[in-house]
Image (cartoon, grey):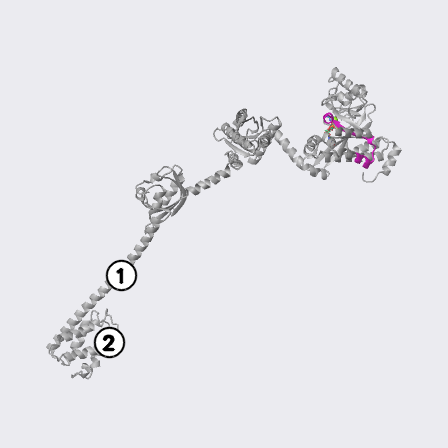
Amino acid sequence: MGWDAGPGPDSDDPHALAGRWTAALTGGVRDHVVPMSAEETCALLARLAGEFEAIAGVPEPAARVAELGAELARSHFVGDEVLGRSIAVLGAHFGAAALIPPDRLADMLAAFANGYVRAFRAWLLAEQESVRAAEIVARRSVEQQLRASEARFRAVFTQAGIGTGLSDLSGRIIEVNTAFATMLGYLPEEMCELSGTDLVHPSDDHGMWDLYLALLRGDHDNVQLEKAYLHRDGHTVWTNLNVSLIRDEHGDPQYTLVLVEDISEWRALREHLNYRAHHDQLTGLPNRSRFIDALTAAFADPARSFGLCYIDLDHFKIVNDTFGHAIGDALLVQAAARLSACATGPGQLVARMGGDEFVILVPQSVGASEVAETVLDAFTQPFDIHGHHLTVTASIGVMAARTEHTSADELLQAADTTMYWAKAAGRGRYVIFDADRGRREHTRTELSAAMPAALTRDELFLDYQPIVDLADAQMVAVEALVRWRHPVLGVLTPAQFVDLAEDNGHIGALGALVLERACRDSRDWHDRYPGSTPTVSVNVSAAEVSDPTWLDRVQHVLSDTGIPPESLQLELTERAFMQTSGRPLQALRTLAALGVHIAIDDFGTGYSNLVYLSQLPLDVIKLAGPFVHRIRTPDAASPSDVLVLESIIELSHALGFTVTAECVETSYQASRLHDLGCDTAQGWLFHRPMPVDEVTDLLEDRSPAPHRAARSAAAPPGR
Ligand code: C2E
Ligand code: MG
Ligand code: MG
């Protein structure tokens, strides 16, 4: 290098200058960029110093010295003080050693400074330019991204199948997409001219707009609901509406974004299914489920009064069977139309419960009977069905009020029952529910259900009521009277359940039980008190006698217990005899022929056809209580009553029958009946119905003393 090779006082110490210059530039110089290490810096500055000195000798050094300054700047020594310190180090070094004449040194340092400054400015401009270029690149990239995201948003907004719209907080539509506009029959720009009120639909409820206002206030960020809009052509478009609040950077509400989806078809389908679920397909009337909903709603309000008509077409089955189901269906449709015309009052509801049963809910309880009358009137005209003129009546159960029923189901059940009362009363009429009758029938239903178990659980037992000879009041027979020890209701009398057993088919089992037990007790008395055993009289209903197996059963019991047939008496009421003909009557004749006594019970309460009696296999006439009651006291007995009794007794005797008077309660009755020739009597005057053991006690009391002692000694323990 020139520095190393050049002469001068410092020429032997070129590194000393480079070291000082390096120290001046790196020690505490701020703001300059030095992208090289200390060694590299020292080497650079040593070279520059060497060249500076070498140039001093050439004739025009300025340009070359300027180039050294420029090199320093281009080497990124660009801090505030770089130039000043460099001038100071170079000036001091070359000036002190007088290596370069002072005036020339000053020119060289000035040229060095110029070169440095020029290069520094160029560097600075280049730096600024590169920063600007970088900024431009960055900004372009951000803009590009923004444009891409905006384009995506536009694409979503404009092309989305779902209706989309943007509104400001005043409700003004700023923008909508084609899907939204088309949904309502507009162009997007036309929709932007609509006001908020143009989007109001009559089916909007207040709650909906309150919700929208709450959203605008910022109370919610999103609201979702079903809303109807009016299409430009007037029809309704149902939508699923989703409104979201868009806030500004401070969180204040700014816009609302609306997403709407046309659900008209789906809603129509839903309504159709709903309609089908609640309407009868044949008649179009509300169906059972819809009616139960309405009734339950009416029931839920205890203050609400309402009535109900339960309607059943009479003999509808015959129409179906005779004319076929198509005519039957057409009749139901016409009947439904007539019923609808009968129930046009506010809140009245006609429904088909199924088959030929209809109901009308009448909101005002006072009106239910009137509605029933209107219905009966409407059914007086024949139905014209495909040329057939059919007259069909209706039976109606009317619930005039909600009564004591505690649920819609119970009320409906009661209405149904009442409708059956109307049927039983002759059809083509209405009957109003009667709570007492309802209760009685309810008990009957429950008793009927409990009867099979009662028969097997031994809940039925017998009392016996003695029948005495009117001449000496001695017991000659006992009547078996059945009772039911009900676990909840206590002891029930035959009037409470015998008819029921006849209706529900349990009378056969009941009668068999009574007959067997009575014959077993009779067997016991025969064994203990031979010779003074009372006849045992068993009540038998017509239904039992009609059973083809009944005769066998009676004969089987007789042979099983081995009691003489003469000690058994069977009582049938007059009415039962009237229902008994053919084979059942033959069964009675067979038993009579065996020696079983046949009695006509409650004689005088029915047809009292004495001529008919002569044809029956009868032994005993039991005069009914009401007959006997007429001669209860001397004052009560009219001559004609006495005459009738006397005639019956005489005629009965003439026909060979024995006469027993029932319900003898006074001694006057007993003596009068005895005077009139009546043979035996039964009644509270002599004995009330009693348990079997008490009959045994009576027999015991009247048997001879030695026999009594012998029997009691022989009696089995525990009796
Ligand atoms: P019924 O055969 O005429 O029986 C006489 C009824 O009169 C009995 O009523 C008896 O308690 C009652 N009675 C007896 N003496 C008097 C009296 O002095 N004054 C009054 N007011 N009543 C008196 P109960 O036991 O309630 O029987 C009623 C009816 O039930 C019987 O009338 C009979 O028709 C029927 N019944 C009873 N047990 C049976 C049975 O095992 N089978 C069938 N099919 N019917 C039975
Ligand atoms: Mg009787
Ligand atoms: Mg009787």
* Residue 149 to residue 502: above or below: below
* Residue 427 to residue 642: above or below: below
Disc 2 marks which residue? 41
User: In this view of the protein, which residue sits in the foreground, 456 or 473?
Assistant: 456
User: In this view of the protein, which residue sits in the foreground, 697 or 156?
Assistant: 156
Report the quarter where the N terminus lies.
Answer: bottom left
Three-letter residue code for mark 2: Thr
Magenta stretch: dominant SS?
helix
Secondary element at tag 2: helix
* Residue range (magenta): 555-578
- Tell me, for residue 137, which label it has, or none: 1
User: In this view of the protein, which residue sits in the foreground, 453 or 69?
Assistant: 453
Residue 330 visible at all? yes
Judged left or right of residue 269, residue 435 is right
Which image quadrant for residue 630?
top right
Q: Is residue 566 magenta?
A: yes
Quadrant assignment for ligand 3: top right
Q: Residue at x 24, y 63 (%)?
A: 131
Residue 465 visible at all? no
